[in-house]
Image (cartoon, coloured by chain):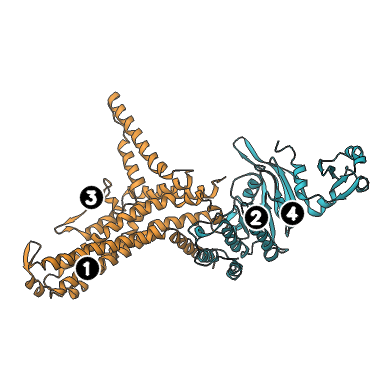
Amino acid sequence: MSSVISARNLSKRYGKRTAVDGIDFQIPAGRIVGLIGPNGSGKTTTLKAALGLIPFDGELSVLGLDPRTQRDQLMQDVCFIADVAILPRWLKVKDAIDFVAGVHPRFSRDKAERYLAATKLRPDMKVKEMSKGMIVQLHLALVMAIDAKLLVLDEPTLGLDIIYRKQFYQNLLEDYFDEHKTIVITTHQVEEVEHILTDLMFIRDGKIVLAASMEEIGERYIEVMVSQDKLSAANALQPIDRRTVFGKAVMLFDAGPGGASRQQLAALGETRNPSVADLFVATMKGSYA
Amino acid sequence: MNTPTNTMKWLLHREFWEHKGSMFWAPVIVAALLITLIGGSVFYGVAQHGLATRITINGHVVHTGTLAAAADHLRPAIAKVASGLYLGAAAPLFGILTVVVFFYCLGALYDERRDRSILFWKSLPVSDPMTVLSKVLTAVCVAPMITIALGAAASLILLLVGCAVMALYGINMFGVVLGTPELYLAPLRLLALLPVYVVWALPTIGWLLLVSSWARTKPFLWAVGVPLVALMLVNWVNVVLSRVAGTPLGFAHTMSGIVARMLGGVVPGIWFTFPGVVQGGVPQGPEGLDVGGVFTQSWMSLATSDALLGVIAGAAMIYGAMRMRRWRDEG
């Protein structure tokens, strides 16, 4: 299979407001893609369209299926965590496992129980007795025990403390992900996911402004600590972002085709790869203004 | 393991887990109260005043001595009492059933949207029609069957309490009562009336589920308010028209019938109150309620066009609720 999700001219309008504006993208199998954008940029809408939760315009194919008409079939191979701590309050841990085991053909009870054994959760516990972090642990245990081809996570760690957040991504990477699986994550906390992502998609005002693999981004974007005497030369190369750290100018350059070359930039000062967060801030400039 | 039957089984489990309190514990507690109150007062009454030395059965005065001797002769009368008691003791439970089913349907597709847990349920390979169907089945089959079972059990216990009291005074009724076929037929009759209940409950259940799948807030207000306001409007137009033009609106009467069926269908036996559905209303025998008559009349009510129209309307609204659950965007 070439791509897990492929969108052509995907649009979604809510009344007069355009949430997703004719986007095209491909997500190949075996990748961990970060879909990153500010609030209201259309990332959740895009995911909802892919999960068949909302009607949309344009073409969208997920695992070769149309989420609008073939959702029931699609959900055999797709799993998602669409929001934090949304398990119903009356649900008991053991009932949750029984239920998912009963309705999902690709669920492994052993896996779920093994994962839960490492937590404080007990079979007779109800969701309403749990902390937010524990609810997410239960949800993740259920989802990780499902051998799905595509896993979609929409802000999966929102509002959790750092221990749960770190643990969440660690579990995902160590116990779940392999080359046959694809994970799509949206999040605000870019710093926490950047080291696990293989691909990046920035979305802004319903449009995709950047879609590339992490290697491509490493090659293309370069951050330079410009020495004081080379400031004007640096400015002439049209940096996409400037900031000042401890009195030193830090500039971000797009070294892609038509931009400055690596050698030129190296001459300006110390170079390094920018963090995804810095790249995000530079790309999204203006959308918060 | 992932067959539709199996999925349905787990969906029904799911509904029961969520509503164990209202569907199981509430009727259990009421049944226990009934047994304590009725059974207790029988015991207390007999202990305080002793057993009446004569009892009136069918207008004949019978002395207890004779009663003990004439148990065989009284078999049919006891059978009537036994079967009557079944329906009688279960009545408060059916009252609870009505309330439970009404509010269950109203919340069935609304609560999961309010607490957003719908996003979890929809992440599993369970289709929307299947989910909605499981809720319909819970309302029209699971909840009434629990009530029938508990009602039969409570009645049986009360009957045995009565027999035990009699036995204390040397009148052994156990053999006679337990040998009465009515004793075993009564709960089966109730169970056999379930399909009739399903048919007449369907329009109400469809309407409540539709509102439940659609309302953003306050489903109760929408479910009850919309039909009542519509009814008031029609009545008002009717009054105005008959004053001004002299001809009343033809469908004003039909409208109140529709509203009654939209909201009242979940009341067991409601079909006896719908005009033109059952000839002559609730059948009365010489000794009160004619149980056999109730049974036949109820099944006969299904042959009316009202019943058919209700099923069609109910099914259409349930289909609407399925579509709504499939496409409603929770934002």
Label 1 packing within 10 angstroms: few (<14), some (14-19), many (20+) = many
- Residue B225 visible in rendering: yes
Position of A276 with respect to B51 (left or right) is right
Chain for numbered disc 2: A
Badge 4 amino acid: Glu
Q: From mark 3 to mark 1, how far is it between C-alphas?
A: 33 Å
Give the structural element (helix, strand or loop) at label 4.
Answer: loop
Circle nearer the viewer, 4 or 3: 4
Instruction: Check residue B159 in the rendering and tell me which mark sits there, or answer none.
Output: 1
- Contact between marks 2 and 4 (CB within 8 A): the answer is no
Identify the residue position indicated by label 4 in the image: A194
Q: Residue at x 87, y 49 (%)?
A: A271
* Image point (22%, 73%), residue name: B178
Residue type at tag 2: Val
Is A43 placed left or right of A270 in the picture?
A: left
Q: Label 1 amino acid?
A: Leu
- On the question of residue B141 being in view, the answer is no
Rendered shade, chain A: cyan
Q: Nearer the viewer, mark 2 or mark 3?
A: 2
Closer to the camera: disc 3 or disc 1? 1
Give whichever of discs 3 and 1 has the lower sequence position: 1
Marker disc for residue B61:
none
- Distance between the alpha carbons at the discs numbered 2 and 4: 16 Å
Please tell me the colour of chain B: orange
Which three-letter amino acid code belongs to the residue tagged 3? Gln
When the figure is inspected, residue A53 is found, relative to residue B138, above or below; the finding is above
Extreme-front residue of the structure: A246
Q: Which residue is mark 3?
A: B279
